[in-house]
Image (cartoon, rainbow, N blue to C red):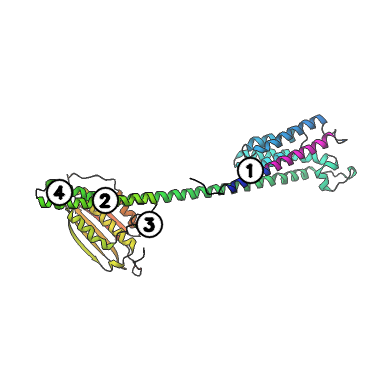
């Protein structure tokens, strides 16, 4: 998929900023290390703190740790471990360790973070202690204490050094934790968005599968019943009529299949709802029930039908579509599982009272039936539940299978709008 022009520009800008920050961090850390090298190796009177060669070696190691900050985000544990060694063993600063701690706090939330924080705190305390003993011209602690000459040197107590080290350690720790929290929140939001999209896609696939089952299953069941009638009929005129009916049913099934394929290809909504194509077929309504019943009769299904509806033309579109599909699924089950039996279909309803549907048929023991997975009844239950109704299905003590559903029919709702 081609990305729109300029879509990668924010990524390039962020990467450029990251490179600049890395260069700045490494440069500042190396500069700080060199200042320590100058203070320890070339300032008279500093030899009592650390011999020049050891100070130089420590400074070189600290410079190496500063260069290692380039990989602080990829390997925060190793970079932090390497950065705390120079200030603990040699007379160097702990700036590299503090910077590495920020990356560690952003990446980890386990024991490695607390161990690294403790190590950086100790290294920082040692570095601050050494800094407090340096010449006042090169001591940051003495500078903040107000000492301008060696005679004005301030004796910094241990607890003050520990407090200074704690503050210095807390700052990068807090920055890292904040950065890591923001990153985790961004990832969580992205993952939630992906999950919502996947759930929506799964819901749409389930809906399409349910529509395919309801529509194509009914058509194919009619074809099966009509084909059976052809096998046992010797009447030429009846054979011709049934063959014509088979052709019409097959054509309808093909049209339904084309509609489903159009949904999968173009993303349109199938059998109800908002569509993006002007050529989309309208969803079934209560007015389509007579045609459904007539088609089933012509296919050879015997039925006793009672339909008492008040204000059917004003019924809400979701109600009409659900009622049509429920009756369709019930008749499909009769055709599949109890061929040759008669079905009793009762549909009653009015605004403010509700719509009740009951389809029953005698169980046919020992008959050859098509064993289904219960997908159709699950679809019926989902439709009824979405509209706030109730549904029940199953055999009775009189060996009659009954599918009964009740759907709410709002009294003041204009059924002309979906």
What range is drawn magenta here?
22-44
Q: Badge 4: few (under 14), some or many (20 or more) residues near its Cα, within 10 Å?
A: some
> Which circle, 3 or 1, is nearer the viewer?
3
Residue 103: percent from left, percent from top: 64, 42
Q: Which mark is residue 277?
A: 3
In the image, 278 versus 132, the foreground residue is 278
Q: Residue furthest bottom?
A: 412
- Residue depicted at x 49% and y 49%: 192
> Which circle, 4 or 1, is nearer the viewer?
4
C-alpha separation, residue under disc 3 versus residue under disc 2: 20 Å
Marks 2 & 4, CB-CB < 8 Å contact: no
- Residue 407 is drawn in which quadrant? bottom left
In the image, 180 versus 214, the foreground residue is 214
Total marks shown come to 4
> Which circle, 2 or 4, is nearer the viewer?
2
Residue at mark 2? 253
């Amino acid at each position: 998929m081609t990305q729109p022009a300029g879509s990668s520009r924010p990524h390039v800008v962020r990467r450029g900023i990251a490179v600049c920050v890395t260069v700045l961090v490494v440069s500042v850390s190396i500069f700080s290390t060199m200042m320590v090298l100058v203070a320890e190796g070339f300032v008279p009177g500093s030899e009592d703190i650390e011999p020049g060669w050891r100070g130089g070696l420590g400074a070189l190691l600290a410079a190496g740790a500063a260069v290692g900050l380039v990989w602080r985000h990829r390997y925060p544990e190793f970079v932090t471990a390497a950065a705390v060694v120079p200030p603990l063993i040699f007379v160097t600063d702990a700036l590299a360790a503090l910077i590495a701690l920020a990356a560690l706090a952003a990446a980890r939330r386990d024991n490695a973070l607390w161990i690294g924080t403790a190590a950086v705190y100790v290294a920082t305390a040692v570095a601050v202690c050494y800094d407090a003993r340096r010449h006042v011209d090169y001591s940051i602690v003495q500078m903040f204490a107000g000492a301008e000459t060696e005679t004005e040197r301030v004796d910094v107590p241990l607890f003050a050094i520990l407090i200074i080290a704690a503050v210095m350690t807390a700052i990068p720790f807090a920055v890292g934790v904040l950065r890591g929290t923001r990153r985790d929140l961004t990832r969580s939001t992205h993952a939630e968005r992906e999950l919502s999209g996947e759930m929506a896609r799964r819901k749409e696939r389930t809906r399409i599968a349910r529509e395919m089952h309801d529509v194509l299953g009914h058509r194919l069941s009619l074809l099966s019943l009509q084909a059976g009638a052809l096998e046992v009929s010797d009447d030429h005129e009846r054979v011709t009529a049934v063959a014509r009916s088979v052709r019409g049913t097959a054509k309808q099934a093909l049209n339904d299949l084309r509609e489903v394929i159009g949904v999968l290809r173009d993303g349109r909504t199938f059998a109800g709802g908002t569509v993006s194509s002007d050529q989309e077929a309208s969803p079934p309504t209560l007015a389509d029930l007579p045609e459904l019943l007539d088609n089933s009769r012509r296919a050879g299904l015997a039925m006793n039908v009672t339909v008492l509806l008040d204000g059917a033309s004003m019924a809400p579109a979701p109600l009409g579509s659900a009622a049509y599909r429920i009756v369709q699924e019930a008749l499909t089950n009769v055709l599949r599982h109890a061929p040759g039996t008669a079905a009793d279909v009762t549909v009653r309803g009015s605004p403010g009272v509700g719509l009740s549907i009951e389809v029953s048929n005698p169980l046919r023991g020992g008959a050859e039936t098509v064993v289904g997975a219960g997908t159709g009844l699950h679809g019926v239950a989902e439709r009824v539940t979405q509209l706030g109704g109730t549904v029940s299905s199953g055999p009775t003590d009189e060996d009659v299978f009954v599918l009964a559903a009740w759907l709410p029919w709002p009294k003041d709702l204009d059924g002309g709008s979906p």
